[in-house]
Image (cartoon, rainbow, N blue to C red):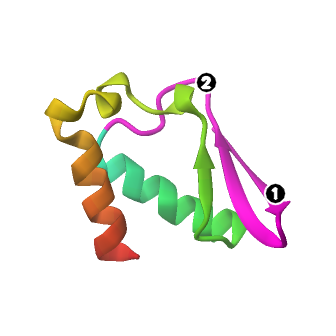
Amino acid sequence: MTIKMEIHDGKGIAAIESAEKAITDAQSALELLISAQYEAGSKNIVVAKEAVADDFFVLSTGIAGEILQKIVDYQ
């Protein structure tokens, strides 16, 4: 997994690229957010679709909602 800092419209964005699934559940998403903030110094992130577990895109699994709730809770 690589975290690259990019600038778009004057804002720093951490771009996450990974050959393997970096986000598989809410805990891994939270750890990735913390890593991106620490390494790139930005709360704004972009994650490649390939780095997210396929179950995230199936809303009935509840993973997307769980991850979004963690993001809201931990800002």
User: Quadrant of the rendered structure where residue 47 is?
Assistant: top right
Residue, x 43% and y 57% (percent of image)? 31
Residue, x 58% and y 70% (percent of image)? 43
Q: Which residues are magenta?
A: 1-24
Classify the position of the N terminus by image quarter. top right
Q: How many marks?
A: 2
Classify the position of the C terminus by image quarter. bottom left
Q: Tell me residue 32's x, y (percent).
A: 49, 53
Query: Label 2 crowding class (10 Å Cα cut-off): few <14, some 14-19, many 20+?
Result: few
The vertical placement of 62 against 8, above or below, is above
What's under tag 1, amino acid-wise? Glu
Q: What label sits on residue 36 in the rendered view?
A: none
Task: Label 1: state its secondary structure.
Answer: strand
For marks 1 and 2, give the CA distance: 19 Å
User: Quadrant of the rendered structure where residue 10 is?
Assistant: bottom right
Answer with left or right where residue 11 lies relative to residue 24.
right
Q: Tell me residue 44's x, y (percent).
A: 61, 65
Task: Label 2: state its secondary structure.
Answer: loop
What's under tag 2, amino acid-wise? Ala
Residue, x 49% and y 60% (percent of image)? 33
Q: Which residue has dot 1 on it? A: 6
Q: What label sits on residue 19 in the rendered view?
A: 2
Residue, x 40% and y 50% (percent of image)? 29
Q: Earlier in the sequence, mark 1 or mark 2?
A: 1
Q: Tell me residue 52's x, y (percent).
A: 45, 33
User: In front of the other: label 1 or label 2?
Assistant: 1
Query: Label 1 crowding class (10 Å Cα cut-off): few <14, some 14-19, many 20+?
Result: some
Answer with left or right where residue 34 lies relative to residue 63.
right
Marks 1 and 2 close (CB-CB < 8 Å): no
